[in-house]
């Protein structure tokens, strides 16, 4: 079993997700969103599972840096262009996906 975690090494929630799986001896593939965006297929899979509104982190530094709190914008376009706007961690196990810290869901995957 391999779990994919998309996030930032500086993000507390991402580090907690990585720790959750490693403590249970489950292999983790970490993807730093600052270096690699979700592929179009991965993005669509996440969007289909949780919806666009759940994907954005309106409290992120990137959201504030872009001044999005004061603008109307195409949510999907912004999320595709700026992966640091994503609520992290994005955790994938096969076809299952979670956004944000969801240890109760992750336990069902084990």
Image (tube, rainbow, N blue to C red):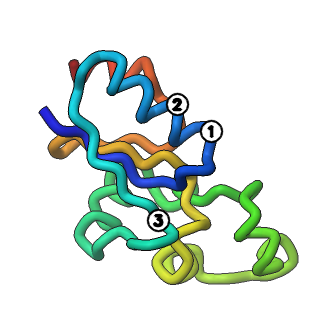
- Rounded to the nearest angstrom, the CA distance separating label 1 from label 3 is 14 Å
> Can you give x and y, in whole percent of width and height, for residue 37 in the image?
40, 72
Question: Is disc 1 in contact with disc 3, using a CB cutoff of under 8 Å?
Answer: no
Image position of 52 with respect to 97: above or below: below
Q: Specify the quadrant of the image occupied by residue 73.
A: bottom right
Question: Is disc 2 in contact with disc 1, using a CB cutoff of under 8 Å?
Answer: yes
Which quarter of the rendering shows the C terminus? top left
- Rounded to the nearest angstrom, the CA distance separating label 3 from label 2 is 16 Å
Report the label total: 3
Return the mark for residue 12. 1
Circle 2 — which element? helix
Which quarter of the rendering shows the N terminus? top left
Q: Residue at x 44, y 72 (%)?
A: 35
Residue sitting nearer the eye, 30 or 98 = 30
- Rounded to the nearest angstrom, the CA distance separating label 2 from label 1 is 6 Å
Image position of 34 with respect to 45: above or below: below
Check disc 2 and report the residue beneath it: 16
In the figure, is residue 12 to the left or right of 91? right
Return the mark for residue 33. 3
Residue sitting nearer the eye, 20 or 55 = 20
Q: Residues within 10 Å of mark 1 (few under 14, many from 20)?
A: some
Residue at the far right: name it: 70
């Amino acid at each position: 079993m391999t779990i994919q975690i998309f996030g930032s090494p500086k993000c507390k929630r991402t580090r907690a997700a990585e720790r959750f799986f490693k403590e249970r001896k489950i292999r983790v593939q970490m993807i730093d969103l600052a270096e690699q965006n979700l592929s179009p297929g991965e993005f669509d899979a996440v969007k289909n599972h949780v919806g666009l509104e759940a994907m954005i982190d309106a409290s992120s530094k990137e959201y504030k840096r872009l001044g999005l709190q004061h603008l109307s914008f195409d949510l999907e376009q912004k999320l595709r262009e700026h992966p640091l706007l994503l609520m992290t961690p994005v955790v994938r196990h096969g076809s299952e996906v979670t956004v944000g810290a969801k240890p109760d869901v992750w336990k069902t995957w084990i």
